Image (cartoon, grey):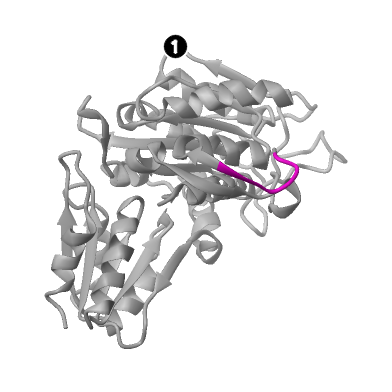
């Protein structure tokens, strides 16, 4: 944690480390994988300086399992990977949802499937972030488009994880992960830092670790502090023990969902530049944002009535914002480094009120401003 504001040249992966350290990360467990290895290397260097712990596990499954254990012991915990490793983490990601373990999972995306193109950019894990683990479940996934935004959204990811007792996914792509930009790192007194809600310690004997509360987020004690605290991947009641009843299953699923759905105004983050007269809007996220904004700026100089929406939160999806845009715009353009993943959510909420067009690259090359501009020039 930096005590005062500093301007530094920073790589995207290292911005995750800077953001984590700034917000009080204490534990990293994971396994090296391109293009996310610098995240692990950074935490290996920095955590011991503040009394934190870094451990390289034997594989990706063990990496997230160990990080969950660190979280249960009371430490702000993080793991990092890329697409193949993200697939291996999915079962335990579901466990983290079920036991409500605060956790940040970083996925620096590369081209797949399988080994794919390990050093090339992709946005191919968008749907995996939402539906990769089994069953219905809530999730929060954030996507930065710059190195500074990577720092900011890493801080947000930890804060959301702690606030809502929830695993949070940070979806970079190789471009953002490996680029370097000048970044102004705020001092410790400038940051909002959220810590998990813990019990007050007055009645340990009758404590229930999954008590129903008004905000749907029960207090979470640290393991080893004298509370009876049972965790299980089975559906459970407020005591943490499974009874095998349908009532427990529905009640718990509803609470897990409600704590996210009822706080979408807090969780869904986006930036926009959409004027009343704009009749075409580019909706983008991650590294494609940079080309989208550049293309919109050039289109405006040519008299095209264009605007842009940058999604910083991918899940939960900004459905109300998309519906609002669809009421005014004639055309929505969605550039993605995949065959078309988030565009399906856009189409679903536009519901035929505007034309929705995708721009897609999935061969390890970039979407450039001219690709977006060419599509924008179809609208006057």
x and y, in percent, of residue 379 in the image: 15, 79
Q: 10 Å neighbourhood of mark 1: few (<14), some, or many (≥20)?
A: few
Farthest bottom residue? 277
- Can residue 101 be seen here? The reply is no
Farthest top residue? 58
Q: Looking at the image, which residue is at 61% across and 35% down?
A: 240
Q: Looking at the image, which residue is at 76% across and 30% down?
A: 227
**Which quarter of the figure is the C terminus placed in?**
bottom left
- Can residue 87 be seen here? The reply is yes
Q: Is residue 24 above or below residue 302?
A: above
x and y, in percent, of residue 378 in the image: 11, 75
| Quadrant in which residue 309 is drawn | bottom left
258 left or right of 308 in image: right
Q: Which residues are magenta?
A: 2-8
Secondary structure state at the residue bearing disc 1: loop
Magenta stretch holds residue 7: yes
Q: Which residue is mark 1?
A: 58
Q: Is residue 370 above or below residue 237?
A: below
Q: Is residue 58 above or below residue 151?
A: above
| Quadrant in which residue 87 is drawn | top left
| Total numbered badges shown on the rendered structure | 1
């Amino acid at each position: 944690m930096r005590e005062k504001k500093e301007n530094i040249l920073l790589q995207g992966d290292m911005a995750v480390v800077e953001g984590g350290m700034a917000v009080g990360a204490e534990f990293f467990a994971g396994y090296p994988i391109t293009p996310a290895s610098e995240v692990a290397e950074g935490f290996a260097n920095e955590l011991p300086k503040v009394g934190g712990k870094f451990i390289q596990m034997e594989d990706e499954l063990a990496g997230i399992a160990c990080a969950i254990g660190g979280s249960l012991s009371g430490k702000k915990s993080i793991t990092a990977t890329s697409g193949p490793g993200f697939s291996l983490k999915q079962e335990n990601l579901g466990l983290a949802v079920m036991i409500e373990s605060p956790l940040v999972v970083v996925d620096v995306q590369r081209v797949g499937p399988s080994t794919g193109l390990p050093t090339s950019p992709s946005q191919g894990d968008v749907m995996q972030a939402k539906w990769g683990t089994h069953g219905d479940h809530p999730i929060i996934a954030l996507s930065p488009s710059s190195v500074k935004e990577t720092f900011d959204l890493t801080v947000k990811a930890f804060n959301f994880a702690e606030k809502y007792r929830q695993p949070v996914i940070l979806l970079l792509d190789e471009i953002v992960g490996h680029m370097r930009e000048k970044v102004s790192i705020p001092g410790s007194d400038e940051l909002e830092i959220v810590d998990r809600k813990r019990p007050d310690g007055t009645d340990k004997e009758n404590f229930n670790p999954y008590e129903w509360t008004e905000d749907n987020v029960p207090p979470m004690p640290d393991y080893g502090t004298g509370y009876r605290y049972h965790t299980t991947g089975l559906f459970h009641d407020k005591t943490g023990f499974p009874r095998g009843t349908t009532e427990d299953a529905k009640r718990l699923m509803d609470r897990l969902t409600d704590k996210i759905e009822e706080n979408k105004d807090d969780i869904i983050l986006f930036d926009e530049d959409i004027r009343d007269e704009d009749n075409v809007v580019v909706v983008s996220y991650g590294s494609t944002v940079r080309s989208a904004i550049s293309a919109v700026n050039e289109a405006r100089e040519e008299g095209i009535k264009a605007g842009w929406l940058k999604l910083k939160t991918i899940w939960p999806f900004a459905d109300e914002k998309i519906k609002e845009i669809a009421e005014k715009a004639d055309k929505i353009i969605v550039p993605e480094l995949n065959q078309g993943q988030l565009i399906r959510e856009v189409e679903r909420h536009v519901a035929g009120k505007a034309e929705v067009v995708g721009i897609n690259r999935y061969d390890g090359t970039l979407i450039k401003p001219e690709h977006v501009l060419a599509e924008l020039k179809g609208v006057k």
